[in-house]
Amino acid sequence: MDLASILPAAAFWLFAAITVLAGLMVISSKNPVHSVLWLILAFFSAAGLFVLMGAEFLAMLLVIVYVGAVAVLFLFVVMMLDVNFVELRQGFMQNLPIGIVVGLLLLAELGTLGAAWTFGDDVARNAAAPTPSVEQVENTRALGQIIYTDYIFIFQTSGLILLVAMIGAIVLTHRERVGVKRQNISKQNARRPEDAYELVDVEVGKGVSLPTKKG
């Protein structure tokens, strides 16, 4: 076996091992900042796997979108939070049985879903279709054909779900709250100079009297 055949396999196992290890550290690290840093490492390793598969477009998207935007946003949010780790550890053992029950329920649901999973005719036909060579269709065009041709309805449905989630987040953020002052731009623009101040004609001898200091 020559070096040209050994090097891609070694690179794959290296990136795969780093991705799995980083994923385990994300969920096992007690410090949220360290978890986000491990997540960034997992994203980089997954991008390396995409490059080895010849999907450099997906690799660049993973680095630019997830590492450059999402993961950095997670990191900034976690660093700005005043996390009290002592309070987090106090209720850990008390809520541990409930967490185990919820985890077992989720595993049972996932197992049931996997056992009852059925593929449609379109999915089976697309899976059986031969994959064009890189010389005929580059991976960017192939990705566009798959998303916007074969799975256009699923893509549009996911876009609608994200739109509803965004609208819900905006509505929850701008809901009316008691005792919270908000800026009313239309009211500020409609304000006139005569509404900003008031002239009061104070009669002589009826002004405001200051308290005198007792000696």
Image (cartoon, rainbow, N blue to C red):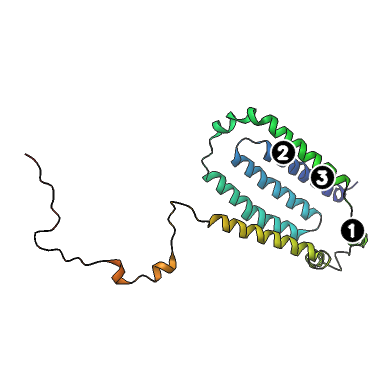
Which of the 4 quarters of the picture holds residue 89? Answer: top right
Q: Which mark is residue 120?
A: 1
The correct choice, above or below, for 49 with respect to 130 in the image is above
Where does label 2 land, which residue? 24
* Position of residue 26 measured from the top left corner of the image (x, y, whole percent): 68, 40
- The residue type indicated by label 2 comes to Leu
For marks 2 and 1, give the CA distance. 34 Å
**Nearer mark to the viewer, of 1 and 3:** 1
Residue at left 63%, top 44%?
36
Please tell me which of labels 3 and 2 falls first in the chain: 3
- The residue type indicated by label 3 comes to Ala
Q: Is mark 1 on a helix, strand or loop?
A: loop
Q: Residue 10 carries which label?
A: 3
* Position of residue 153 measured from the top left corner of the image (x, y, whole percent): 79, 65
Please tell me which of labels 1 and 3 falls first in the chain: 3
Does residue 71 appear left or right of residue 180 in this picture?
Answer: right
Q: Which of 98 and 34 is in front in this view?
A: 98
